[in-house]
């Protein structure tokens, strides 16, 4: 059986809403069979997230997520919102800002699309080990972020205590690498 | 140390954009310390996704994701867009529509928020086993969906072949339950 033609040709579109967090685009695409489709999409900056762990703990944060009406347990993360910064550089900056630590060893775990159906946002997950406190950095208290060192021996409980995609993907990966 | 007050009080807001896939809301919230914050959010229907597997295969689909400009490998899924339908009922309907199969055994795996930072969309993941073909249902060819039975013995390759959040979470779960 021959491989079907899977070309998706972008035909352009327009921005119909824009704010600091994302923009909404209406775009058209032509499929290989000639059909033209219109898609409403959320465009947003990519992000980096960090599974930071030492011999005893994985370092999580608890922070307000107003969209959900609750405080959620998550791995540290942030948007790639500094011009010219690579995903790894963002990860290093966010780890320092959110939990006040640097890491000597960094490993790319994987990337994922949170919402393939309507957004091209890509989240890069890194593992950070050989952690050490960075005395020059005060974890940002203005963001209401609580640092939560979670026992590595109880990753199942952390997975039960969160519904956040990046955190689930990161902790499932960590559990698999440790078993 | 006493538990901090983590109340997040919704103060209302307005819809600033609306389409068939989602709406954009600007909403205000009051934190426990009195500070009022404004958040731009994407509101969208929840969804259900299915890790359907038998003794040999996990049943995946390959479909066009125009937002990404590519065809992606995913577990079957769909929005809760039928009035009154529960997440499990949606999962059963989508499994039939996308791969033409019913399942006797259903298990709730977990739910997750794809984008906690700006959306309250929740995706419910189910495991479906004891599969059988449903002769009454033609998997929908109009959606350009290709059915991909993936060998259970090679879940790592499936995880390497996708960047889709629900698929990663579902397949990492499946790999953990089988090891």
Image: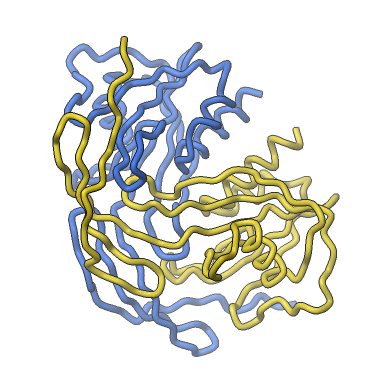
Chain colours: A blue, B yellow
Please identify the quarter of the rendering in which residue B177 is found: top right
At x 45%, y 71%, the residue is B66
Vertical position of residue A62 compared to residue B140: above or below? above
Quadrant placement of the N terminus of chain A: bottom right
x, y percentage for residue B61?
Answer: 65, 65
- The answer to which of B8 and A60 lies nearer the viewer is B8
* A26 left or right of B165 in image: left
* A104 left or right of B62 in image: left
At x 29%, y 12%, the residue is A133
- The answer to which of A25 and B133 lies nearer the viewer is B133
Vertical position of residue B39 compared to residue A38: above or below? above
At x 40%, y 62%, the residue is B44
Vertical position of residue A3 compared to residue B58: above or below? below
Please identify the quarter of the rendering in which residue A176 is found: top right
- The answer to which of B162 and B124 lies nearer the viewer is B124
x, y percentage for residue B73?
Answer: 60, 60
x, y percentage for residue B158?
Answer: 65, 51
Residue at the far left in the pictured view: B35
């Amino acid at each position: 059986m021959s491989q079907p033609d899977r070309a998706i040709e972008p035909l352009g579109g327009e921005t119909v809403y824009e704010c600091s967090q994302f923009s909404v685009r209406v775009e058209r695409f032509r499929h290989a069979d000639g059909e033209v489709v219109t898609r409403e999409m959320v465009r947003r900056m990519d992000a980096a997230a960090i599974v930071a762990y030492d011999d005893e703990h994985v370092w999580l944060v608890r922070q307000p997520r107003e969209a959900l009406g609750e405080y959620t347990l998550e791995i540290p993360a942030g948007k790639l919102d500094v011009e010219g910064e690579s995903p790894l550089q963002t990860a290093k900056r966010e780890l320092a800002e959110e939990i006040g630590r640097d890491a000597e060893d960094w490993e790319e775990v994987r990337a994922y699309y949170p919402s393939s159906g309507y957004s091209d946002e890509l989240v890069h997950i890194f593992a950070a080990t050989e952690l050490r406190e960075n005395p020059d950095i005060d974890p940002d208290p203005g963001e209401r972020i609580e640092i939560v060192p979670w026992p590595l021996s109880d990753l199942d409980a952390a997975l039960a205590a969160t519904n956040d995609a990046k955190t689930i993907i990161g902790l499932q990966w960590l559990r698999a690498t440790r078993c």
